[in-house]
């Protein structure tokens, strides 16, 4: 399972031309966006 996750992260880095730092920021903003969506749906 860990190997599959590493392979997927490496694929994403190659596909989008990101380094580790850029991928970390992308994942951060994805989490913020999904968290904001969840809060919006829960508070409606």
Image (spheres, rainbow, N blue to C red):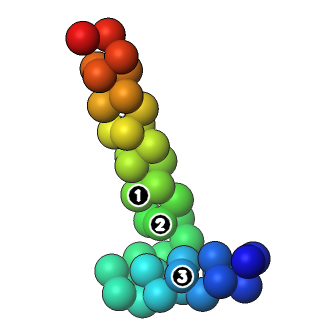
Closer to the observer: label 1 or label 3?
3
Q: Which residue, as the protein is rendered here, is positioned at the far left?
A: 44
Mark 3: secondary structure? helix
Q: CA distance from mark 2 to mark 3?
A: 12 Å
Mark 1 closeness class: few <14, some 14–19, many ≥20 residues within 10 Å = few
* As drawn, 13 above or below 30: below
**N-terminal of the two: label 2 or label 3?**
3
Closer to the observer: label 2 or label 3?
3
Residue 36 shows in this picture: no
Residue 12 placement: quadrant: bottom left
Number of dots carrying numbers: 3
Q: CA distance from mark 1 to mark 3?
A: 15 Å
Quick one: 26 or 31, which is closer to the camera? Answer: 31
Residue 43 placement: quadrant: top left
**N-terminal of the two: label 1 or label 3?**
3
Mark 2: secondary structure? helix
Mark 3 closeness class: few <14, some 14–19, many ≥20 residues within 10 Å = few
* As drawn, 11 above or below 33: below
Residue displayed at 52% across by 59% down: 24
Residue 32 location in percent, x, y?
41, 37
Residue 20 in the figure: left or right of residue 44: right
Mark 1: secondary structure? helix
Residue linked to disc 2? 23
Q: Are marks 2 and 1 in contact (CB under 8 Å)?
A: yes
Residue linked to disc 1? 26
Mark 2 closeness class: few <14, some 14–19, many ≥20 residues within 10 Å = some
Q: Are marks 2 and 3 in contact (CB under 8 Å)?
A: no
Residue linked to disc 3? 8
């Amino acid at each position: 399972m860990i190997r599959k996750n590493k392979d997927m992260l490496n694929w994403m880095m190659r596909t989008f031309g990101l380094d580790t730092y850029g991928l970390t920021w992308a994942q951060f903003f994805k989490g913020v966006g999904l968290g904001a969506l969840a809060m919006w749906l829960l508070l409606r």
